[in-house]
Image (cartoon, rainbow, N blue to C red):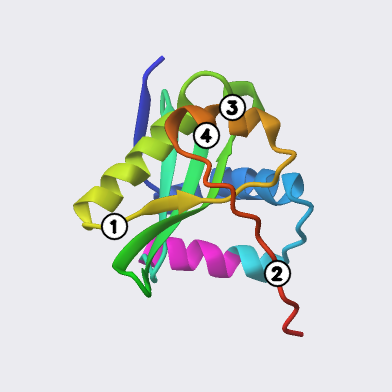
Amino acid sequence: MSLTIAPLQAHERSAWQLLARGYMDFYKTEKTAEDYDTAWSRLLNQDGIHGLGARRDGELVGMAHYYFHTAVWAQKVCYLQDLFVLPTQRGQGVARALIEAVAEAAREAQAARYYWMTQEHNATARVLYDKVAQYKGFIRYDYPLA
């Protein structure tokens, strides 16, 4: 079974939304139908964000969302915001292929750094992350703005 990584395509909306909902469910995050519509539109238009799909024999089985931003000490860095693979496809190299595809996009964009975050309890994903990246020990805090 062949695996390909390429930008998300308009006809993949329903398959993408299944993946996006799986991601949001994992992190116990509620999104409205309008939120999904807006995100999909922004991804297709590459409105500051980018989306890649992993396809196995033509079926969308994984997704990665990423974007570039400036930082105080670097003109451009790459942030992998969302990464999700169908449970039936895990352990078969899909997540690693998506991570590598975003890394290639970061290199092409001459980003100084490529990073992502996950929750401490995401042990399965962290096994892969520990193989492909360096854990730097940071802890994230979110200040409520509302």
Q: Which mark is residue 112?
A: 1
Q: Which mark is residue 142?
A: 2
Task: Confirm whether the magenta stretch covers residue 95.
Answer: no
Q: Which mark is residue 129?
A: 4
- Residue furthest to the top: 1
- Residue furthest to the front: 137
User: What x and y, as percent, mark residue 73?
Assistant: 34, 70
Residue at numbered disc 3: 127
Magenta highlight range = 37-45
- On screen, residue 60 versus residue 126, left or right, reads left
Mark 4 → mark 3, Cα distance in angstroms: 6 Å
- On screen, residue 87 versus residue 66, left or right, reads right
Q: Nearer the viewer, residue 51 or 79?
A: 79
- On screen, residue 1 versus residue 141, left or right, reads left
Q: Which quadrant of the rendered structure holds the N terminus?
A: top left
Mark 2 → mark 3, Cα distance in angstroms: 25 Å
- Residue type for callout 4: Tyr
Q: Nearer the viewer, residue 24 or 141?
A: 141
Q: Nearer the viewer, residue 123 or 23?
A: 123
Mark 1 → mark 4, Cα distance in angstroms: 19 Å
- Residue type for callout 3: Val
Mark 3 → mark 1, Cα distance in angstroms: 25 Å
